Image (cartoon, rainbow, N blue to C red):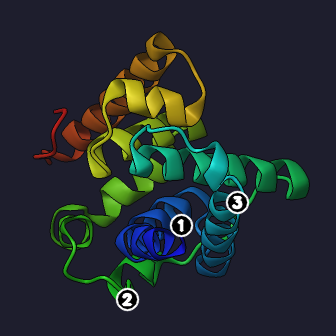
Amino acid sequence: MRSSLDEVYRQYIGELQRYLYFLCRNHHTAEDLVQETFYRAYLYLESYSDEKVKAWLFRVAHNVFIDRLRKEGRVDLYEAEYFERAADKETPETLWFGHELSLKVKRILEALPLAQRQAWLLYEVHGFTYAEGAGILDISLASYKIALFRARHKLREKLQEGGSCSHDRGF
């Protein structure tokens, strides 16, 4: 069982770190949250039921992030250069962020309400289905779809103001 957790760790650490970084916008806090995520995953491995491991880990990460918010209040520290020095430079997400996501898009995403930003990240960047994303955020499917719709709408609206367009899955 330990070797399978090690494999899961190696497979998903990069994605979890990018997801948590984008939520808290602090490299060191994201690293702490990733470690806490895997610690909790290790503790609750026995309660893991045959759901998809990626969705389960992101659910644990979401809960860790929410716990941190409750404990410390709003986290608003920024490290804009994180995406340029991310460890996994060869992953599709970092290539997409590095080549397609302009500074304007990053600012628009950061300005979105947390629920909309999380819904957009889970669907557009990490490839979760609507149901998986709603499960990770522990909200109804309808609420998830509304948050994703509003995030897309705001992003599209702001990009059209500047004459840009996006090529991701939902636009």
Q: Pick whichever of labels 2 and 3 is earlier in the sequence.
A: 3
Q: Amino acid at mark 1?
A: Tyr
Q: Element type at marker 2?
A: helix
Q: Which mark is residue 85?
A: 2
Q: CA distance from mark 2 to mark 3?
A: 27 Å
| Residue at the (65%, 64%) spot, across then down | 42
Instruction: Pick whichever, 142 or 40, lies toward us.
Output: 40
Q: Pick whichever of labels 2 and 1 is earlier in the sequence.
A: 1
Left or right: residue 7 versus residue 45 is: left
Q: Amino acid at mark 2?
A: Arg
| Residue at the (42%, 50%) spot, across then down | 53
Q: CA distance from mark 3 to mark 1?
A: 18 Å
**Which quadrant of the structure image shows residue 100?**
bottom left
Q: Element type at marker 1?
A: helix
Question: Do the CB atoms of the residues marked 2 and 1 lie less than 8 Å apart?
Answer: no
Residue that label 3 marks = 40
Residue that label 1 marks = 21
Q: CA distance from mark 2 to mark 1?
A: 13 Å
Percent position of residue 158, x then y: 31, 39
Percent position of residue 19, x then y: 47, 59
Percent position of residue 146, x then y: 43, 17
**Which quadrant of the structure image shows residue 7?**
bottom left
| Residue at the (61%, 77%) spot, across then down | 31
Percent position of residue 101, x then y: 24, 61
Q: Nearer the viewer, mark 2 or mark 3?
A: 3
Left or right: residue 101 versus residue 52 is: left
- Within 10 Å of disc 3 (Cα), the crowding (few <14, some 14-19, many 20+) is some
